[in-house]
Image (cartoon, rainbow, N blue to C red):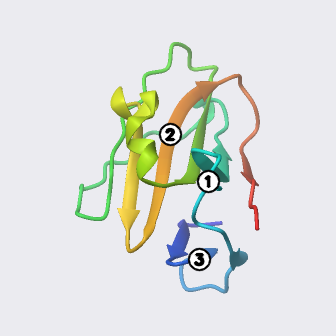
Amino acid sequence: MIDPHFTLHPPAYFHLRSGNNPSLIEGLVWTKPEHSALVSPWIRFISNPFRDLGAPQGITPTRKSTIQTLHVESDESSIAVNFDFVDERANLMPLVVERKAKIISWHDVSLLAYARPVAPQKAALGDLIRG
């Protein structure tokens, strides 16, 4: 897949596609956590080990892009990136307060984005879609 992009169209439709090709994955999701939960898990990305990734390509930051720096202790590590739906209570979560996670909000939807190093593994895309 060349130039994949995941798009959430609020309030609840999402798709994954490459360029102008038809969607590979699409569906509807609940975008609010249950009242008893801080997050509603959604998407999990895992990279190949850092040493196997291509050289970074510079991007120009724009209003629509967020760059997060992640320090890894070993180039053997893979990188996990989680996207979970949250509500206003997420602003008090330690990951957000300590600036280790970012809340991305638009329309009436908020996502918690969080990246971390994990044990080496093959790249994967997973979902924890509820609803």
Q: Looking at the image, which residue is at 24% across and 56% down?
A: 60
Q: Name the residue under label 3.
A: 12
Tag 1 near tag 2, CB within 8 Å: no
Label 2: state its secondary structure: strand
Q: Looking at the image, which residue is at 24% across and 55% down?
A: 61
Quarter of the figure that contains the N terminus: bottom right
Q: For residue 35, which numbered disc appears in the image? A: 1
Q: Distance between the residues labelled 2 and 3?
A: 21 Å
Q: How far apart are marks 1 and 2 (CA)?
A: 22 Å
Sequence-earlier tag: 3 or 1? 3
Q: Looking at the image, which residue is at 38% across and 74% down?
A: 107
Number of marks: 3
Instruction: Check disc 1 and give the amino acid type.
Output: His
In this picture, residue 90 sits left or right of residue 3: left
Q: Looking at the image, which residue is at 70% across and 22% down?
A: 119
Q: Position of residue 78 (x, y in %)?
A: 63, 30
Q: Position of residue 93 (x, y in %)?
A: 45, 34
User: In front here: 37 or 24?
Assistant: 37
Figure check: 90 above or below 120? below
Label 1: state its secondary structure: loop
Sequence-earlier tag: 1 or 2? 1
Q: Position of residue 2 (x, y in %)?
A: 59, 67
Work out which residue is located at the far top of the displayed protein and give it. Answer: 73
User: In front here: 109 or 102?
Assistant: 109
Q: Mark 2 points at which residue?
A: 114
Instruction: Check disc 2 and give the amino acid type.
Output: Tyr
Mark 2 surroundings: few (<14), some (14-19) or many (≥20) residues within 10 A: some
